[in-house]
Image (spheres, rainbow, N blue to C red):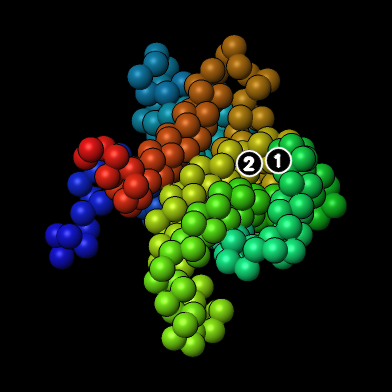
Amino acid sequence: MAKRFYWLRSGRVVAGLTIIALLMLCAIFAPWLAPNDPTEQDILNTLVPPIWNAGGDWAFPLGTDSLGRCVLSRLIYGSRIALTVAVFGALGAMIIGAILAHVAGYFGGWIDWVIGRVVEIWLSFPPVILSLILMVGLGAGLQNVILAIILVDWTRFCRVLRSDVMVVARRDYVAAARLLGFSHGRTIVREILPATLPLLITLMSLEMGVAVVVEAILSFVGMSVGAEVPAWGQMIADARQDIYQAPWNLILPILAIFVTVFGFNILGDGLRRTLDTRLTQTERA
């Protein structure tokens, strides 16, 4: 059992998992953790400062925005949007990218050439600009945000995994599996995928952080969820007009995005260092 969970010995992995676990708890138990309704407006209590500033109110621990909505409650409910996009967006991009990467790296030849050219063409567009273009065509909405992230970011997985698959496909045990009569599909799933899985897990963790940033950008420009749904990017957009009167309304959602992305990034880096045998052998040497 200890050997199975040896990756938990990494401080980066533990720190990343702790941050993500706290965010998941906030997202799951938001109705019980949020002190107020995140959409309820209180015109009599607009721009109330946080409790550590003069004039703070314990009814609104992190203050209120220009419409009197509780900032803490909106941050807690905003974690739901961020994690939903991170999980489903990264998962969809991983599935498409991993399938194409394994097909290209295993078969090679004209199949690899065609997939490689498609990836190069897709990567020639700036990711954020391409996401905005897709959102204009698809329309606003959480499902469309997830779909846009999948359509844009599958190339990240395909480009990185392809080279790893090509290396694994040349190993002796893969050739032995083919000599034993394994089909191409069985060879990829049973022999190649387990070897590339550590890299795949690492890439997905990093992609989750990218998805959080993309969703924040899209909600900032009003192309994500509706105005009635709390989102961190939307909070940043709303706080711009009161940046001098209430800077905390701008700083707090930015800090939430930073901590979330930081958690996913250090988790991905920790998993890369512990699961990639090539790195562990180098460090031991």
Please give the name of the residue rendered at 56% of the width and 24% of the height, measured from the top-left corner.
Answer: 250
Please name the residue shown 23% across and 50% down the image: 8
User: Mark 2: few, some, or many residues within 10 Å (few <14, many ≥20)?
Assistant: many
The part of the image, by quadrant, that contains residue 176 is bottom left
Q: Which mark is residue 214?
A: 2
In the picture of the structure, the residue carrying the numbered disc 1 is: 127
Residue 146 location in percent, x, y? 65, 55
Asked which secondary structure carries label 1, the reply is: helix
Q: Is residue 44 visible?
A: no
- Residue pictured at 74% horizontal, 64% vertical: 110
Q: Amino acid at mark 2?
A: Val
Sequence-earlier tag: 1 or 2 = 1
Residue 96, image x, y percentages: 63, 63
Q: Is residue 256 left or right of residue 280?
A: right
Q: Give the vertical position of 185 relative to 78 (above or below).
A: below
Identify the disc placed on residue 280.
none
Count of all numbered marks drawn on residues in the image: 2
Secondary element type, mark 2: helix
Q: CA distance from mark 1 to mark 2?
A: 9 Å
- Furthest toward the bottom, the residue is 181
Q: Quadrant of the N terminus?
A: bottom left
Q: Nearer the viewer, residue 184 or 60?
A: 184
Viewer-nearest residue: 254 or 66: 254
The answer to whether marks 1 and 2 mark residues whose Cβ atoms lie closer than 8 Å is yes
Evaluate whether residue 1 shows in this view: yes
Residue 279, located in which quarter of the rendered image?
top left
Q: Amino acid at mark 1?
A: Pro
Q: Nearer the viewer, mark 1 or mark 2?
A: 1
Residue 142 point in image, percent of width and height: 66, 55
Along the viewing direction, whichever of 16 and 98 lies nearer the viewer:
98
Image quadrant where one finds the C terminus: top left
The residue at the point 50 percent across, 65 percent down is 169
